[in-house]
Image (spheres, rainbow, N blue to C red):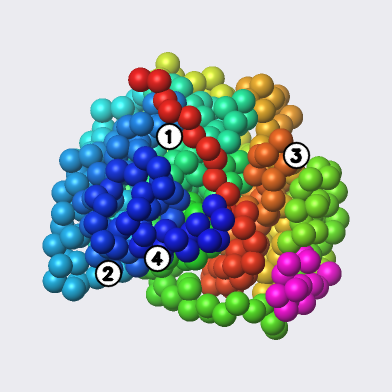
Amino acid sequence: METTRRELLLAGSAAALGGGVLPARAGTPATDDIHFLEIHEIARLLKVRSLSSVELTEYMLRRIERHDPGLRSYAFVTPDLALAQAREADGLLRRGEILSPLHGVPVAVKDLFYTKDVRTAGGMTIHRDFVPRFDATAVRKLRAAGAVLLGKLQLTEGAFADTSRLMPPPVNPWNADYWPGGSSSGSGVATAAGLCFGSLGTDTGGSIRIPSAANGVTGLKPTWGRVSRRGVFELAASLDHVGPMCRSAADAAIMLGAIAGPDADDPTALQAAAPDYNAASGHSLKGFRLGFNEHYAMDGVDAEVQRALADTLRVTAALGATIVPMRFPSVDATIADWRRALAVEAAVAHEATFPSHRDDYGPAFAHLLDSGRATSAMDYQRILLRRQTFTGEVNAALEPVDAMLIPAQPAGPLSMARMATLGQPGSKDGPVLVRFTAPFDMSGHPTLTLPAGFTDEGLPLAVQFIGKHLGEAAICHAGRAFQRVTGWHRRHPQLRESAT
């Protein structure tokens, strides 16, 4: 969307620019693109009561009904709950009570977050009738911030690599012939397509960052433990991360600020209070030291991604950042260890139902769990020792810099035909696909994935800023500065009407 068009929307023009369905009252923005506004922009409109949360929620529900049958990003929608929460938000707004920048904003969450009295399947047939008695801590915190829950978003089976057997996979809104990423594919598709203003995903080997890259949105994997995992279906306990997927780095900072922090019900959640991740709001990166290891970032990477990296380096340098050549440890052994650690921890997570209910598991997931059960304690201990060493090496490499720049993926989005074997025994795509993601699940460092260009076919490209432990504020600052002077995150897919 052009800057002038965006300014028109935010100026509150009452003239719809085509097909708007919000009430045409004074102060209401043009509506054909309102679904692509950022959270902080929608918050401003709600605050001055240019529109109500109920009006906005109804509009988004109609948009989901219109477009999601073809995109399949939602496992299911919760219209009654969403409208009840929107009415509650409007009541507080009328009294001048604003809980946070998320107050009254419609969002959605991956369907492995527990939602009280709302079924939560985790992409698995074995859990399709499970109805939690409490909200996941991250969901509870979103509600405390005043957010409105539109529904639950589709994912792969058990948040692993294979398609969920509950329904067909989501469709990449840029091109249906290309993979939408996994496992938080529904979160990536819904956010990119304007079917929510932000979403929650989880990341065990790249499942926030890969679908963020594939769908052209901004995804934030926090430091491990920065966000509580209570009430989240487990894939691999020491690798699972909870984080937001949004339009922009500013929005990711808003959502992270709402869900991060200690949790009395989760002893693994970090005790440090969450800061204001948008506090460093300056346009400049003067004094910011951005590390770059050419060997890790460029070797084996497609030319289009290399150009996106080079452009990002030029933009950040123009904003005042100092580009610092840096050493970085080899990731090859760590990626192999990640797969084996994932298998062991997933086998523990599923020991109550696997192998006793093997028929409820797809072949790829079953193979993973079998391999985890076959791994010896001696081998697992060796993995843990190597993991500790790698984490220390990453800490040392990042010490002289504020963040490091790497690709999100070695290429643009991959075709569905190529990804048909993802996660299957003997697949060669897996290690390549997670080269820039899994190492930071092993080390627990925070990463921000953001759009940084497009392929010749018009598909999104992405890069990552890697931060120090608890360095989310620094990478959000770098992301905001980058996005203030680039427009990649403001390009959106053109959706066709779904045939229903």
**Residue furthest toward the front?**
15
Residue type pointed to by label 3: Asp
Find the magenta span and give its range.
313-325
Q: Quadrant of residue 153?
A: top left
* Residue ID for mark 4: 11
The residue under label 3 is 456
Going by the numbered disc 2, the residue's amino acid type is Val
At label 1, counting other C-alpha atoms closer than 10 Å, the crowd grade (few under 14, some 14-19, many 20 or more) is many
* Distance Cα–Cα, label 3 vs label 1: 26 Å
Q: Earlier in the sequence, mark 3 or mark 2?
A: 2
Pick the residue in front: 24 or 330: 24
Looking at the image, is mark 1 or mark 4 earlier in the sequence? 4
What element does badge 2 sit on? loop
- Secondary structure, mark 4, is helix
Q: Which of disc 1 and disc 2 is earlier in sequence? A: 2
Q: Position of residue 21 (x, y in %)?
A: 30, 43
The residue wearing badge 2 is: 48
- Position of 107 with respect to 396 (left or right) is left
Residue 298 visible (yes or no): yes
Residue at image x 54%, y 52%?
1
Q: Residue at x 26, y 28 (%)?
A: 129
Camera-nearest label, 4 or 3 = 4
Residue hosting label 1: 73
Residue sitting at the far top: 359
Looking at the image, is mark 2 or mark 1 nearer the viewer?
2
Q: Secondary structure at mark 3?
A: loop
